[in-house]
Amino acid sequence: MLSKTLETVINDQIKHELYSAYFYLSMSAWAESSNLGGAARWLSMQAKEEQEHALKFFEYVHDRGGKVTLQAIPQPPAEFTSMLDVFEQVQEHEAKVTALITHIYELALKENDYASQIELQWFISEQVEEEKNAAQIVDMLRMVGSQPQALFQVDHELGKRAAH
């Protein structure tokens, strides 16, 4: 049985994961309208992945006898100044998500909820990957600066992202 405390914070996390999907979809729309089809594809795939994370938490709450309570999702920003701006925001956002998941894990530790600790381990490992990917893209974009040919190449590489 999931405690009320963990049920509440996981319900909050479902909202955060759905916001993440919305945030990445907004970025994807901006990239598409900026003729950055590769970045748009990468961000759209990221949005789908965040939806999957929300559903994983959703199912976990039910599996543990809890009640899912969906919350309002804030509107994400729609305007960005550059591809670097987008991915710097991705990097910052993923760091925030990591902190949220770490907080849930700390509560599970405090409550000796071993099942939740095991479930959250998957999310912690996922966040290591998310932060690494964002940092690599930011580093790449900083290296190329505003050189159009180099940005074109980075955009092309982002478009090669495969679904996992």
Image (tube, helix red, strand yellow):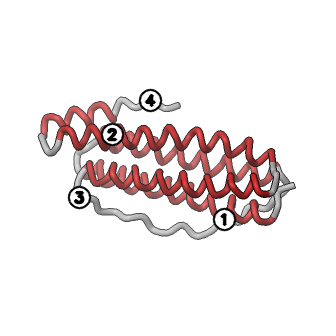
**Measured along the vertical axis of the image, is residue 143 above or below residue 5?**
above
Q: How far is the residue under mark 4 from the one under mark 1?
A: 30 Å
Q: Which residue is mark 1?
A: 70
Instruction: Determine the secondary structure under disc 4.
Output: loop
Q: Earlier in the sequence, mark 3 or mark 1?
A: 1
Which three-letter amino acid code belongs to the residue tagged 1?
Leu
**x, y percent for residue 21:** 50, 53
Residue at 49% in and 32% down: 163
Q: Residues within 10 Å of mark 2 (few under 14, many from 20)?
A: some
The numbered dot on residue 81 is: 3
Q: Quadrant of the N terminus?
A: bottom right
**x, y percent for residue 71:** 63, 68
Q: Which residue is mark 2?
A: 137
- Residue 154 location, quadrant: top left
Q: Residue furthest front?
A: 110
Which three-letter amino acid code belongs to the residue tagged 2?
Ile
Q: Residues within 10 Å of mark 4 (few under 14, many from 20)?
A: few
Instruction: Determine the secondary structure under disc 3.
Output: loop
Residue at 13% in and 40% down: 148
Q: Which residue is mark 4?
A: 162
Q: How far is the residue under mark 3 from the one under mark 2?
A: 16 Å
Q: Earlier in the sequence, mark 3 or mark 2?
A: 3
Q: Nearer the viewer, mark 3 or mark 1?
A: 3
Q: Earlier in the sequence, mark 2 or mark 4?
A: 2
The one nearer the camera, 97 or 164, is 97
Residue at 60% in and 43% down: 124
Q: Earlier in the sequence, mark 2 or mark 1?
A: 1
Q: How far is the residue under mark 2 from the one under mark 4?
A: 16 Å
- Residue 35 location, quadrant: top left
